[in-house]
């Protein structure tokens, strides 16, 4: 894939200081930036008084019950609708939701048992659902053009693909229809499968036990849709994990971390060029590198507190922020840092535990951690802090130790014996991809190999079953996500992977000016998939590519 075209000084200055400096002076500057806690993006400031930290109880997302379990398949139904919710205490905020909650309801699946989720779209715009980290067939992977249209959205013309019909309804500024009445220029997808009101997503659940998440993946508008609330958790369980003796039940706590900002009337604040999310994709110029909020939500609550026993807890952590990176640490009130014992990554359990004092987590990454509160006195508090934050964004949440209690959980020295053993010598080929800023259809964009996303173009073709090594190069922060497959990190900057790179991942956080090598086997299914940056604003502005497996 070719390099991106150059940018004028005026264009660079419009993107933001760090990004402009990087693009103008090259990767050497970015490499220097990577040695300090740089951020990619600009922060929105809330216009409403914000609550004090550690007062709101931590909500736990409800577990969705199947509507049917017959025939060896669990069937679920989810309605996507707008509701008003109390996110900030005493304030009602309109949210786009799955089943009326934020986060959406959690789905609990068993390995090897198929499930079908029927999504009904009662929102004012088209949607797409992607099960992030799932080994999904192409028809259920949530390809960005496979829209579920709401009532009243224009019908496709007879004998013409839905996307061609929508492309004929061109908007202004040379924008052709893709995700609504208009979208990215020239984007027509003859392979798109569009449905009205409902769509069945079927998952074989043929993968390792892990925590996945589902979110909207509509082309050009993923970032604002997630920001408005379209995200939820999805667990895969199996007997091998159950037998390990890890903390379970009330001592296994899912934590979806996401930053947001609020208007004076309590509505979510977001710098969309088109707040209706119908016509013109993208964000205002200061936020082209990514949108950051000044309120840290965990499971939809601002800086919450959770009562725990003086015992081990398993924390299942997702960074569901659009662009914000965190470096998490657990600190007692007397300043002592507790160990963060990592037992899992994006794609399930590690082979053996890895102990950290702090842990970086990029958008879309998940970590499975054990934190031991045994030695914290009753009444004491442990704060989860963000070492990359400042002011209010330095705090995430807190745990308050409520009581002494028995604890028969354990952390086995061997966690998983099913880790793949891929070697560089197994690779059928090595590929290189540069993730950099550039120009797209006369506007600012984010490019892979110098090209913006086009659903009608195949960027990479791989053979089913082949092992490949990919070298990924970044200008600024880019959390790179591969659909369908998990991968292992081989190197960063020509050196050994970092401690938090252990295990099987589906998202890797590239730091400014960094290159990394990953290795994977492209197995599972034939068909069209994606790889992209999971800074959601970058994704919407072109940093996505097609991957054809077959």
Image (tube, rainbow, N blue to C red):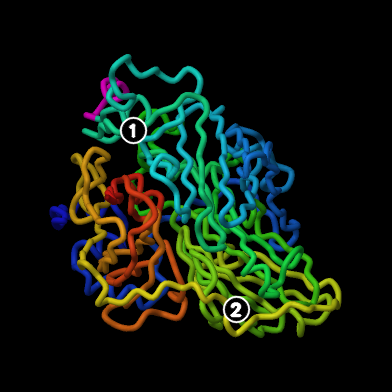
> Could you tell me residue 71's position as x and y percent?
63, 40
Please name whichever residue, 143 or 170, is drawn nearer the observer in this view of the structure. Answer: 143
Q: Quadrant of residue 437?
A: bottom left
- Residue at 38% across, 66% down: 487
Secondary element at image label 1: loop
Q: Give the range drawn in magenta.
A: 165-174
Q: How crowded is mark 2: few (under 14 residues within 10 Å), some or many (20 or more)?
A: many
Q: Which of marks 1 and 2 is nearer the N terminus?
A: 1
Q: Quadrant of residue 17?
A: bottom left
According to the picture, the residue beneath numbered tag 2 turns out to be: 340
Residue 16 belongs to the span the image colors magenta: no
Relative vertical location of residue 314 with respect to residue 299 in this rendering, above or below: below
Q: How crowded is mark 1: few (under 14 residues within 10 Å), some or many (20 or more)?
A: some
According to the picture, the residue beneath numbered tag 1 turns out to be: 192
Marker disc for residue 366: none
- Residue at 31% across, 27% down: 163
């Amino acid at each position: 894939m070719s390099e991106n075209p150059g940018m004028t000084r005026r264009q660079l200055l419009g993107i933001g200081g760090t990004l402009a400096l990087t693009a103008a002076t090259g990767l050497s500057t970015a490499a220097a930036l990577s040695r300090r806690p740089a951020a990619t993006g600009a922060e929105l400031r809330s216009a409403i008084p914000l609550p004090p930290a550690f007062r709101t109880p931590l909500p736990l997302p409800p577990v969705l019950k199947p509507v049917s379990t017959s025939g060896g398949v669990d069937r679920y139904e989810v309605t996507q609708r707008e509701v008003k919710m109390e996110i900030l205490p005493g304030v009602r905020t309109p949210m786009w939701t799955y089943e009326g909650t934020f986060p959406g309801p959690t789905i609990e699946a068993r390995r090897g048992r198929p499930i079908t989720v029927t999504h009904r779209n009662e929102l004012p715009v088209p949607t797409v659902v992607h099960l992030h980290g799932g080994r999904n067939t192409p028809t259920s992977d949530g390809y960005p053009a496979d829209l579920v249209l709401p009532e009243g959205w224009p019908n496709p013309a007879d004998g013409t693909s839905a996307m061609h019909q929508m492309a004929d309804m061109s908007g202004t500024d040379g924008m052709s229809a893709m995700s609504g009445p208009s979208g990215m220029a020239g984007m027509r997808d003859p392979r798109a499968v569009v449905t009205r009101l409902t769509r069945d997503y079927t998952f074989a659940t043929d993968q390792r036990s892990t925590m996945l998440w589902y979110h909207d993946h509509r082309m050009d508008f993923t970032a604002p849709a997630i920001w408005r609330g379209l995200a939820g958790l999805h667990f895969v369980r199996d007997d091998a994990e159950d037998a390990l003796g890890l903390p379970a039940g009330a001592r296994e706590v899912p934590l979806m971390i996401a930053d947001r900002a609020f208007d004076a009337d309590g509505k979510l604040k977001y710098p969309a060029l088109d707040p209706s999310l119908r016509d013109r994709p993208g964000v205002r110029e200061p936020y082209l590198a990514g949108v950051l909020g000044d309120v840290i939500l965990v499971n939809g609550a601002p800086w919450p507190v959770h009562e725990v026993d003086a015992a081990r807890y398993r924390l299942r952590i997702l960074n569901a922020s659009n662009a914000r990176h965190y470096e998490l640490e657990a600190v007692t009130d007397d300043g002592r840092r507790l160990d963060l014992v990592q037992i899992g990554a994006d794609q399930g359990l590690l082979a053996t535990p890895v102990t950290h004092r702090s842990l970086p987590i990029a958008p879309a990454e998940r970590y499975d951690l054990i934190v031991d509160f045994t030695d914290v006195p009753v009444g004491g508090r442990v704060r989860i802090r963000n070492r990359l934050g400042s002011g209010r964004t330095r705090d995430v949440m807190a745990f308050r130790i409520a009581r002494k209690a028995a604890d028969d959980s354990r952390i086995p020295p061997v966690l998983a014996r099913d880790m793949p053993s891929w070697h560089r010598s197994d690779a059928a080929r090595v590929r290189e991809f540069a993730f950099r800023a550039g120009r797209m259809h006369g506007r600012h964009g984010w490019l892979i190999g110098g090209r913006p996303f086009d659903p009608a173009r195949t960027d990479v073709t791989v053979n089913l079953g082949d092992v490949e090594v990919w070298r990924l190069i970044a200008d600024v922060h880019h959390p790179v996500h591969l659909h369908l497959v998990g991968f292992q990190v081989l190197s960063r900057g020509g050196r050994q992977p970092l401690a938090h790179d252990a295990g099987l991942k589906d998202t890797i956080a590239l730091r400014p000016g960094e290159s990394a090598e990953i290795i994977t086997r492209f197995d599972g299914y034939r068909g069209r998939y994606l790889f992209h940056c999971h800074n959601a604003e970058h994704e919407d502005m072109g940093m996505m590519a097609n991957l054809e497996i077959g």
